Image (cartoon, rainbow, N blue to C red):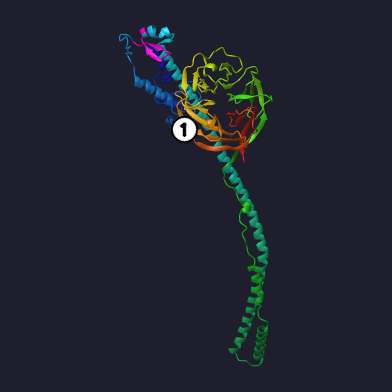
Amino acid sequence: MATSLQQAVDKNLECPVCLSFFKDPKILTCSHTFCKGCLETVLESHRKLLCPTCREETLVPGGDVGRLQSNITVRSLVEDVETQGPSNQEDKCKKHPNQDEDCFCFNCQKYVCCKCAISEHAKDAHTILEAGAHEKNNIEELASKANAKIRNVDNYVKFVVDKRKRVHNVHEKLNDEIDDTFEESVQKLRKIRTVLKNEVGQKLGKLETSLGDMEESGRKQIDEITTARDLVKNGLHIPLQTEALTSHKAKCQTLEELLSRIGPDVELPRRTAEEGERIGFRSLGLDGLQMGQLRQKKFKWVLRTEDPFPDGNITMTGMAISPNNGMAVGCRRGGIVIYSSEAIIQDTVLKSVQVNALHFMPDGGYVIRDSKNKIVLYTELREQVDVTFETIDVTKDGWLGGLTVDKDGLIFIAYNRCKKIQVFKPEGGKAIREIKCNGFEPWQMSAMKSSQAIVVKSSFSTVHVINDVSGAIIHSISKDGYSSYPAVYQDSSVIIAWVRRDQGLLSIVRYTKDLKYIKTILTDFKIIKPNRDWFYLRAFKTGEIAFCTSNRMYIFHETWE
C-alpha cells in the first residue's frame, strides 16, 4: 500500500523540473504548474518565461515570478502529505488484534481485517478492496478533482481577464467620446464667440469712431483758441502804434470770432454714449452645449414570446436546460420539445417516451422519469443506456416528486408521499444514500452549482434550500396566497416564480443562494390560466428565463429601457 501511495504522490505532486514536491507552486497561462524557484531559474536563463512543458510564454508582472497566481489546491495537498508523513504501522483490528486492517469494505465505507472481511462482510455480498488500492484510487480521484478545479479556476481567471479588457475598452472609448464632444463644443463656442464679437464690433465700433471724431474736433478748437489767445496776449509786450495796432485789432477780432462760435454739442456725445451703453450681453446658459453626463444604464425584463405548445393536447410535465442551452419540455403523452433562447423549436425527440420528469447529465445525456418511477438514461444521441435503478415502487409510497442532477452527475429522485430523496450514481443499481425530508414534501428540485445544496419546492407556497447529504433545511421562504416554483439562476442565485393561480398573475423574484432578496424581475404579469395548475421555471445559460404552464411557453429577456 505504501508503494502505491508513494507512486501516486510522485506522479501528481512533484514538480516536472526539480522532481521534488512543489514548493510555492505557481500556475502559468497554459495552466501548467511549477515551483516558484524553478520558474525564477527559467526566467533568469531565458530572460522570458517559457513553460518547460509546452513552451508557451507567460508574461511576468514586473518581472516578479512571485506575482503569478499561486496553485492553492496543489500547495494544500503537498502540505497535507508532508504533515501526515510516512506511517509504518497500520491500524489493528479490534476483534482480531493480531490482524492489520488492510482491506476496505466499499459498502460499509470502512477499513477491516481479512478475517472480518471474509466472516462478516463477504457473506453479505459486500465489495471488498485491498486497502492500498482503495487509497490509491482516493488519491488519484482527489488529484483528478484538483486538476479539474485548477482548470475551472483558470477558465475563471481567463473569463475575468476578458471582462477586464472589455471594461478597459469601454473606459477608453468613453474617454475618446468625451474628448471628441469637448472639442466639438469648443469649436462651436469659438464660432459663436466670433459672431458675437463681430456684431459688437459693428455696433459699438461706429459709436466709438463717432465719439473719436467729436474728440478730435474739440481738441482742434482748443488749439485754434489757444493760438489766437496767445497772439492777442503778445500785444501787452509791444507798443500798439500804427501798423502794430491794426494787426493787434485783427488778432482780437479773430479771437472774438472763435469765442463767438457755438460751443461743443454736449448732448451729441451723451446720446452716442448712451446708445452704446444700452447694448448689453445676456448669457443664454449652456443648455445647448451640454457635454453629457455619465449614467447607469437601466434595464427591464420584457416578454420575448408567448406560444402554445405545438400539439394543442400536449401536457407539460417537466422542464430542464441542456448543456448546449436548449430548453427541453417533457410531455406526459410522450416526447421532449426543445426550444432555443429565441423561442424557436429546434427539435422534438424521444416522441414515444412518456415523461413525468426530466433532467440532463453533464455530458448532455437525458435522465427521464416516468409515471411508474422508472428511471431511464439516454445518450446525447438519444440511445438508451443499459442501466437499471432500484427506485421506490409507486404502490409502496413511492409517489412522484422532483428530479435533478448535481454538478458531479449524481441523480436525485424525490418522493413526496414518503418524504424521501434517493441519490444514485449514473451506473444505476441501489441508491448510494437516502435523504429524509423531515417536515416537508419534496416536489420540484434544482441542484446548486457551487455548493452541496438543493433548492426544493415544498407544498404550494414554500421553497427550501436543503443540504444534499443530510436533508437538513438551511434556508426557507414562502408567500401566503402564492404558489412557488423555484429554479437555480446564474452564479448560483435563485429565482422563484410566485403565481396567483386564481387571478392568472405571475411575479418572478431573484434571491441569493441564502434566499435573501436581490431584485424583482416581473410583477403581476398576466398569463393565460391553464386547465391544469402545474408550472415550471427554468433559466437559459445566456440569462433568459423560461416559464411554462401545462400547455404554454413564456420566455422573458432583459433589455434597455
Which residue appears at 34% of the width and 19% of the height? 85
Viewport quadrant of the C terminus: top right
Q: Is residue 261 visible?
A: yes
- In front of the other: 6 or 330: 330
Give residue 187's position: percent from left, percent from top. 63, 51
Question: How many labels, in total?
Answer: 1
Q: Is residue 108 magenta?
A: yes
Q: How far from the left and from the top, in percent, is residue 118?
A: 39, 6
Q: Is residue 37 magenta?
A: no
In front of the other: 39 or 114: 114
Q: Residue 29 at x, y = what percent?
A: 50, 27
Q: Is residue 378 above or below residue 212?
A: above
Q: Is residue 221 above or below residue 541?
A: below
- Say whether residue 164 is visible: no
Locate residue 277 relative to residue 122 in the image: left or right: right
**Secondary structure beneath disc 1?**
helix
Give the image location of residue 260, x and y in percent: 67, 85
**Residue toward you, 194 or 490:** 490
User: What's the residue type where badge 1 is placed?
Assistant: Pro
Residue found at the far left of this picture: 97
Give the camera-side residue of 263 and 25.
Answer: 25
In the figure, residue 236 lies in which quadrant? Answer: bottom right
Is 74 positioned to the left or the right of 378 in the image?
left
290 shown above or below 36: below
Q: Is residue 414 left or right of residue 89?
A: right
- Which quarter of the image is occupied by the N terminus? top left
In the image, the segment drawn in magenta is 100-115
Residue 290 lies left or right of residue 126; in this view the side is right
Residue located beneath label 1 in the image: 61
Q: Residues within 10 Å of mark 1 (few under 14, many from 20)?
A: few
Q: What residue appears at the point 46 percent right and 32 percent down from the top-left corner? A: 61
